Amino acid sequence: MVKFIAISAMLAYGISTGWLVWQLREQTQSQKSLQFAWLAAALHTLYIGLLCQQQNGFSFGVLSVASLTILSVVLVLLLTALTKPVEKLGVILFPFAAIILGLDVIIDPSPHLLPVHTGAMAVHILTSVLAFSLLMVAALQAILLTIQNTQLKRHPPSRFVLLLPSLQTMETLLFQMITAGVLLLTASLGTGFLFLHDLFAQHLVHKTVLSLLAWVIFCGILMGRQRYGWRGRIAVNWILAGFVLLLLGYFGSKFVLELILIKV
């Protein structure tokens, strides 16, 4: 039953992606794509919930965390799409969510359950997942902004670009996401330091250093935007650099420790 729900969620992600691609090709607007995306997110949530019930807790293995994170990214995108024109990011995000979910179903490592749960730990986990989710959507938005900027210099631009909001609207939305993401990342780092006892013994040097570097870069981007009016390629390049560091910090060490070194 759990695997059937996961497969159904993957199918719904695929249908939603297909609707979005069709809309882009036909230059039409429809809510059916997001309806299937909401269904996929609901099934994905149910899958994670049932898995937690089977395992008597959430597994913090790399694939389980990736599955929860990509679900959070999808939910952030869907909620944002209620008021902002970001639904087209689903063309990239929904297939990726289906792939991560599929890997989580196929690869079944032993669960990594937390021995102790506290309120501070819950806050740290929640803010970490939400910060990563928002900043991932911001990174996708930055990529889309780059494509839009390049295409608008061509005559005529592609149909895909013509369906997007103006560059100013896209940039404003991008920096709103980064601001919210930085606030959550600050809370995540602050609560995370409560659990640091021995960086090397806890295998947290890699994650802590890269996450702090990402935080510095994102804060620098916001300061540069405020003081020097950074925009365009400069801002996008730094945003992508910060997200890559955050990605490596969140998943790099877990991937090496759990999926590579464990097999050596």
Image: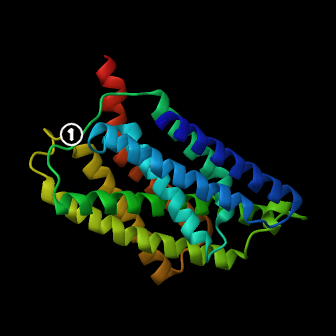
* Amino acid type, residue under disc 1 in the picture: His
Question: Percent position (x, y) of residue 71?
Answer: 48, 53
Please say if 67 is above or below 107.
Answer: below
Q: Quadrant of the C terminus?
A: top left
Q: Nearer the viewer, residue 204 or 53?
A: 53
Please say if 2 is above or below 190.
Answer: above
- Tell me what residue is drawn at x 58 percent, y 78 percent: 172
In the displayed orientation, state which residue is furthest to the bottom: 227
Q: Which color scheme is applied? A: rainbow
Question: Percent position (x, y) of residue 128?
Answer: 33, 58
**Which structural element holds mark 1?**
loop
Q: Is residue 248 visible?
A: no
Q: Nearer the viewer, residue 36 or 107?
A: 36
Q: Nearer the viewer, residue 187 or 71?
A: 71
Write down the quadrant of residue 163 in the picture. bottom right
- Tell me what residue is drawn at x 69 percent, y 74 percent: 167
Q: Where is mark 1, residue-wise?
A: 203
Question: Percent position (x, y) of residue 67?
Answer: 45, 45
Q: Is residue 251 visible?
A: yes
Q: Is residue 87 left or right of residue 114?
A: right
Q: Is residue 20 left or right of residue 126?
A: right
In the displayed orientation, state which residue is furthest to the top: 264
In the displayed orientation, state which residue is furthest to the left: 197
- Tell me what residue is drawn at x 41 percent, y 58 percent: 132
Write down the quadrant of residue 98 in the picture. top right
- Tell me what residue is drawn at x 39 percent, y 62 percent: 131
Question: Percent position (x, y) of residue 63?
Answer: 41, 38
Please say if 150 is above or below 206.
Answer: below
Give the class, few, some or many, for how many residues have Cα within 10 Å of label 1's Cα (few <14, many ≥20): few
